[in-house]
Amino acid sequence: NAGVTQTPKFQVLKTGQSMTLQCAQDMNHNSMYWYRQDPGMGLRLIYYSASEGTTDKGEVPNGYNVSRLNKREFSLRLESAAPSQTSVYFCASSWTETLNEQFFGPGTRLTVL
Amino acid sequence: GDSVTQMEGPVTLSEEAFLTINCTYTATGYPSLFWYVQYPGEGLQLLLKATKADDKGSNKGFEATYRKETTSFHLEKGSVQVSDSAVYFCALSDRDRGSNYKLTFGKGTLLTVNP
């Protein structure tokens, strides 16, 4: 089992460019999450999907969109990247959204120039 | 809203020293509490958890007790090793207004253990 995988690992964008971060899990989990990690800020939830077919905003959703493509895959899209979106992005999954352990991917380090 | 406050780092210890990382929380409901660890260049891993008051979570020599009266979940280890060098995050899971569970993280504490 690969667990939670994310692609790419690193990305550099220019302001205004768009890109999609990919996430997949092979644990048959129902819930999936996108976080961003910034120095001194901990992790902040961007969007989550409690189950296939549903998505909801988290704490910092502005500038992002998500797609729960199927049970395994949950992508995060930046339509017009801004320097404020320079961060490390983590995808996570859990069996359900209720109190269960979240399993994290290795992260994508994104720099927006 | 919910929040988690943990001691600011960095924390630097010598091998075999005693470790305490303080964590306090505010929550509207009855949260579950977690400690996650992030090793350099990796994602977060669950270290231990406690789901109700007075529960003690433990793993790999680390312990934390859910103290409802002091709203705390301090992480302790009796004898740290160089391999424990990492960033440690305290977190809580609680229902939001929409009855959805969310994880709220502290800002993280960097621990460096020197040989």
Image (cartoon, rainbow, N blue to C red):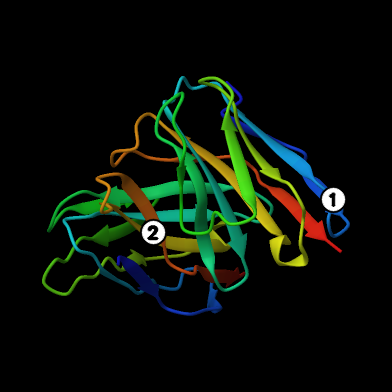
Determine the secondary structure under disc 1.
Answer: loop
Determine the secondary structure under disc 2.
Answer: strand
- Residue B27 occupies quadrant: bottom left
The kind of residue tagged 1 is Gln
Q: Residue at x 11, y 72 (%)?
A: B69
Answer above or below: position of B21 versus B36: below
For marks 2 and 1, give the CA distance. Answer: 30 Å
Is residue A111 left or right of A47 when viewed as pictured?
A: right
Instruction: Return the residue at label 1.
Output: A17
Q: Residue at x 43, y 46 (%)?
A: B46
Q: Quadrant of the N terminus of chain A?
A: top right
Q: Residue at x 49, y 69 (%)?
A: B107
Chain ID for label 2? Answer: B
Q: Position of residue B48 (x, y in %)?
A: 35, 49
Marks 2 and 1 share the same chain? no
Question: Disc number at residue B104?
Answer: 2
